[in-house]
Image: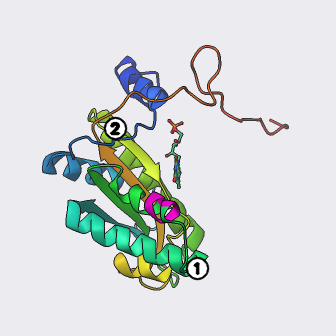
Amino acid sequence: MSEDPSMAPLIEHLLARRAEPARDGVPPTGEQLATILKVATRVPDHGALRPWRFVVIEGSRAKAEWADAMESGLRLTKGPELPESVVAKMRGKTEAAPCSVMVVSSPEPESNIEVWEQEASAACTGYAIVLAATALGLGAIWKSAKVLDAPPVRECFALAGPERLLGWINIGSPEVPKERRGFDEAGRPAPPVTYLAGS
Ligand SMILES: Cc1cc2nc3c(=O)[nH]c(=O)nc-3n(C[C@H](O)[C@H](O)[C@H](O)COP(=O)(O)O)c2cc1C
């Protein structure tokens, strides 16, 4: 394909994207969220299995349910007696943004497409959500926690069998991002690339 100058803004967007914590912002509109999730389902998907699903978490009741599950998971993993600060830090993760989209990898083990390929496809949806949200002018950051495999958290998101939580994307009003990491002096990311010899 020849170089298309109309694609330059897309490349600029991809290069400029930064994780932007969306604390204290407003949630995306229903229309924005629908667009974001539509974009998420256009990721590479070997066998068209759609091996992912999303859970949108908005509002104080949903967040409280999620926080309770995270706290239970933490106590189950680390023991029931924990410093209040540790519990508060875990619960606080659920309140960091007005909207969080949990990314669930939902592979079909019976398929001839390997499970890792299906999980890779699911992981792509997380990035697609981040890209779509930032393209709409929102802040977005992918987050995770060590308790996502704990039974109370799995139950909270109705995970079955081989399903896994890949973390969640916080979405809201953008904030000024922190200093860039992994960028060269020209402000461009420096990819860790080598070329296979022998061409
Ligand atoms: C699966 C996954 C989980 C992540 N979990 C966290 C997290 O819990 N906390 C965090 O600060 N960053 C987490 N990140 C990284 C951030 O989303 C973000 O990439 C990072 O803050 C660097 O910012 P940048 O994307 O602007 O370079 C995670 C990324 C991925 C792919």
Whether residue 149 is visible here, answered yes or no, is no
Closer to us: 130 or 77: 77
Q: Residue furthest left?
A: 30
Residue drawn at 64 percent across, 30 percent down? 182
Question: How far from the left and from the top, in percent, is residue 2?
Answer: 46, 23
Indicate which disc, 2 or 1, sits on the residue closer to the N terminus.
1
Pick the front one: 135 or 182: 182
Residue matched to label 1: 79
Q: Residues within 10 Å of mark 1 (few under 14, many from 20)?
A: few
**Is 186 displayed left or right of 11 in the figure?**
right
Residue 67: image location, x then y, percent: 36, 67
Q: Are marks 2 and 1 in contact (CB under 8 Å)?
A: no
Which of the image's four quarters has the C terminus? top right
Q: What secondary structure is marked by label 2?
A: strand
**Which circle marks residue 45 in the picture?**
none
Coloration of the structure image? rainbow
Residue 94 vs residue 106, the one in the foreground = 94
Q: Is residue 7 magenta?
A: no
- Residue matched to label 2: 139
**In the image, which is nearer the foreground, mark 2 or mark 1?**
1
Q: Residue at x 31, y 41 (%)?
A: 133
* Helix, strand or loop status at disc 1: loop
Q: Which residue type does callout 1 highlight? A: Gly
Prevailing secondary structure of the magenta residues: helix
Residue positioned 37% across, 42% down in the render: 140
Q: Amino acid at mark 2?
A: Gly
Residue range in magenta is 85-89
Q: Residue 8: x percent and y percent?
A: 40, 21
Relative to 147, residue 76 above or below: below
Q: Is residue 53 above or below residue 43?
A: below
Instruction: Give residue 91's position: percent from left, percent from top.
Output: 40, 62
